Amino acid sequence: MTRSLTTAGTLSQTLANDLGQLIVTGAFAVRAFPTETEICDRYQTSRTVVREAVKMLIAKGLVASRARRGTTVNAEDDWNLLDPDILSWIRTRKFSLDLLIEFTQLRLSVEPLAAGLAARSADAKRRAGVEQALARMAAAEQGDEDPLTADIAFHVAVLEASGNRFHRQMRDLIEAALRFGAQRPGIEQQADQHLPAHARIADAILARRPEAAEDAMRELLLDILRPMDLTQMQRKRRPT
């Protein structure tokens, strides 16, 4: 089947986006990847465009190119999973509880400390950002904001308020985790959008109480994780 490239961005970037999403969503098995000629024919594009797109995928760890073996798809362990594009493509995958648990476990290792740092050292502008993000969540409860967008804005505001440049770089990861979780309606998503729990985090940050902010964020994430862990355990106990 022939596919056409859109005019958004360069042709190579558009092609890399399409191929990257196909890889991440499982359209190609590990090591199975179309040849340069097959891609040219499928997308009606030049070899130069294909080679530039493949270079982009190599940089993300999605594929490898070796003499005599051509281009092959790497195992997921070799992917740069924190790459913003890969995180975006992961969000389009079919829902997986195991992946959502891993997302939440990683959040648990990052966000409580970020909240504590925000309470300890955030300047007035970033403290105001946390307060404004909480107001958006309150508006979402009244139907005046999109709940998921407001939730993402709150958690990103906490990362920004931490003052840690590495925490700030986790914005795409947090957004991907929340958007991926939104694919599965259930208790874990409801917990993450629960206004009082977020208010406790914001209040502790604004009151400059690092331990309370860290504890409140940790408890929020554990409230999300516990029912997922229970569901996973029950699923594994079921006879096949």
Image: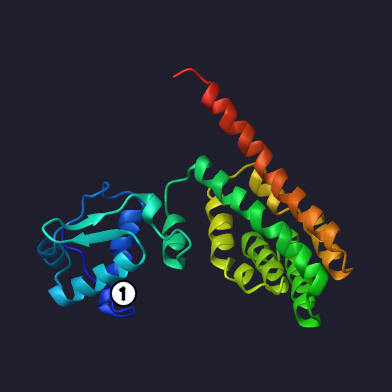
Split into 4 quadrants, where in the image is the N terminus?
bottom left
Could you say whether the residue bearing mark 1 is in a helix, strand or loop?
A: helix
Q: Is residue 167 above or below residue 93?
A: below
Residue at image location 57% in from the left, 62% down from the top: 175
Q: Nearer the viewer, residue 147 or 10?
A: 10
Question: Which percent across, then down, holds residue 115?
Answer: 75, 63
| Left or right of 121 in this view: 187 | left
Q: Is residue 228 visible?
A: yes
Taking the view exactly as shown, the residue that stands out farthest to the front is 67
Question: Which percent across, then down, holds residue 108?
Answer: 66, 52
Residue at image location 37% in from the left, 54% down from the top: 78
Q: Nearer the viewer, residue 27 or 35?
A: 35
Residue at image location 89% in from the left, 68% down from the top: 207
| Left or right of 60 in this view: 187 | right
Q: Is residue 167 above or below residue 68?
A: below
Q: Is residue 138 visible?
A: no
Q: Is residue 124 above or below residue 222?
A: below
- For badge 1, the amino acid type reads Gln
Residue at image location 83% in from the left, 63% down from the top: 210
Split into 4 quadrants, where in the image is the C terminus?
top left
Report crowding for label 1: few under 14, some 14 to 19, many 20 or more residues within 10 A (C-alpha).
many
Taking the view exactly as shown, the residue that stands out farthest to the top is 239
Circle 1 residue? 13
In the figure, residue 154 lies in which quadrant?
bottom right
| Left or right of 49 in this view: 37 | left
Q: Is residue 172 above or below residue 125?
A: above
In the figure, residue 61 lies in which quadrant?
bottom left
